[in-house]
Image: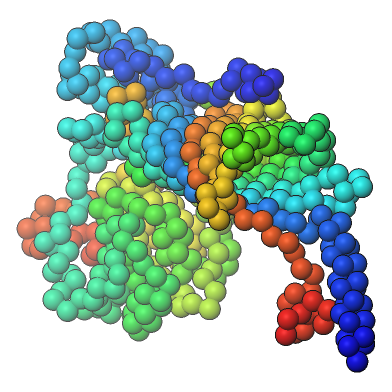
Amino acid sequence: MKRCILLLFFTCWCILSIQAQQDSILVNRYVMRSTLYGIGYTNILDTYLSPAEYTGAEIRILRENMRMTRLLNGKVSRQSLFQAQMAMTENRAGTGSEFAFLANWNFAWHYQHRFNEHIKLLVGPNIDLNGGMIYNFRNSNNPVQAKAYVNLGASGMTIYRFNIKEYPFVLRYQLNLPLLGIMFSPEYGQPYYEMSISHDWGKNLCFTSLHNQPAIRQFITLDFPIKSLNVRVGYVCDIQQSKVNHLRNHTWSHTFMAGIVKNFYVLKGKNKVAMPASVSPY
Amino acid sequence: MLALTLIFHACITEEISENTPKGNFQALWEIIDTKYCFLDYKQDEYGLDWKQVYQTYSNRLTDDMGNKALFQVLSEMLKELRDGHVNLVAYHETSQYREWYDNYPTNFVDTIQRIYLGKDYVTAAGIKYSILEDNIGYIYYGSFSSGIGESNLDEILNELSICDGLIIDVRNNGGGLLSLSDRLASRFTNEKVLTGYMSYKTGPGHNDFSQPEPIYVEPATNRVRWQKAVAVLTNRRSYSSTNDFVGKMKQMPKSIIVGDKTGGGSGLPFSSELPNGWSVRFSASPMYDPDMNHLEFGINPDIKIDMTLEDMQKGKDTIIEAAREILKAKKE
């Protein structure tokens, strides 16, 4: 009987070992997820609303999700990066104010080249979706400017792992550069009222590229553990600008961020009524 | 780093004049020069020469002039545009061009109007209404900034449906929301009606305009629509959105415009600002009638009538009386 029980344990251990080995090679199931909150400074210009620059404080949330894929022998990772920012700004004379909101979703695929165990370089394409508005509190029939644009771009990242006296750090620099896109913009003096009665929106969709939308988003982050938490601090330099339909606009933001990083291992089918009997504790 | 370098060399900014009397003057002149929509039209109408205006008023600037003196020069320069939609807003004052009504009869006395409204008039949202003795409905709408909902209009028109005709009095209504002008006008047609055109500036040149976009009034569907004759009463202070409403009603089949020429104001106003933070409002998008005539200087009534002193002394409103007669005649 004892032999039977030992045999059963041994068989189970073998099966679980094989399962574990299978899982260990499924690197695409490891997910890095972080949520950062930040405060910073922004400078806004939109000549549809005003020729003056408006400056003020900005708050931002940044949610990032990154995992490996099976593409190119598992050397490609994908990154989903969502940001939302709000700013309350004033003109230089302090007589006018503008509220700005922008949400941005960036989806990138990076080919990962590992130089050594400390440093790796990631490059690849990205899709960049943006939507928001700027509201000027004292304008008459041009109080608001809607923001909507989508880009195809290039994304690059360097990740450097290092220790200081056996204390581990991960440093990352990322740059997203839009290359081609489509942007909504009213024409030079076009009221939104006219848009509401017009059926021709073609003139409000503008082709963009580096010549009329020289924009860039940069992120520097540093990860380090504090007790059981994996803390991330960072700096976002978000330069959004365009020149379409004789209208100039820019949003230059510099934001300091802080938050937590969590690492997950995705279990397939975990939401089913019953997990596989081999791994379920129930 | 290369990308970073490129971006810093490609910063998109707007050149702004310095915050000095000359800088603020220059900024204001350029805003009007590049964004104001009636420069060429007004040159044809009364010889406005915006470059000459620059010469005339720049000579009055000095480096050490104070804010009030600068405001005086800038507001006088803006008055050359003869546009009630143009205002300069400073901390201490707002400039206004008022000659579009100051130089004309008022054609509206609220104490006399109250006699017609009576004591039992009804107020619904921004509208006051009552039924006159000869069974003519009377609506006074004093501002297109005072909201009226579709249900308000249903109730009002239902209530007045027993009347033989309807007066809509928009005298002294200085305008407000174009959407309310559409909403009210849509109760007076059973068909889609072309009421005019609208264009806007596509660039900084004086002639950079878009193709005019037709503006239609569509009948309010599943709502109460007025089927009898309607008289719209106007005076010189019927301005901006009210001018738009009168222009729309002029195209309606059973409508007649009675009173004085409207004040105009057919340019949809935009805002901008000067380096010192003063705000400026100006006409940006011109509107036209169905024959592409400008409406900036007002719309002529179908029946031109001024209030007479004799009637006023008797507590009578000449324009309301004329409208009643017209509506009664139409009924017969």
Q: Is residue A123 above or below residue B57?
A: below
Which quadrant holds the C terminus of chain B? Answer: bottom left
Residue B225 percent across, percent down from the top left: 47, 75
Residue at screen point 79% across, 51% down: A68
Q: Quadrant of residue B249?
A: bottom left
Residue at screen point 73% across, 81% down: A281
Residue B310 visible in the shown view: yes
In this picture, residue B23 sits left or right of residue A169: left
Label tally: 0
Nearer to me, B179 or A76: A76
Residue B292 percent across, percent down from the top left: 54, 41
Residue A77 percent across, percent down from the top left: 79, 47
Tell me the colour scheme of the image.
Answer: rainbow
Nearer to me, B230 or B329: B230
Q: Residue furthest front?
A: A2
Residue B101 percent across, percent down from the top left: 24, 41
Residue at screen point 21% across, 78% down: B133
Nearer to me, A186 or B44: A186
Q: Quadrant of residue A14?
A: bottom right
In this picture, residue A80 sits left or right of residue B71: right
Residue at screen point 70% across, 27% down: A210
Q: Residue furthest left?
A: B313
Residue B291 visible in the shown view: no
In this picture, residue A171 sits left or right of residue A46: right
Q: Quadrant of residue A76?
A: top right
Which quadrant holds the N terminus of chain B? Answer: top right
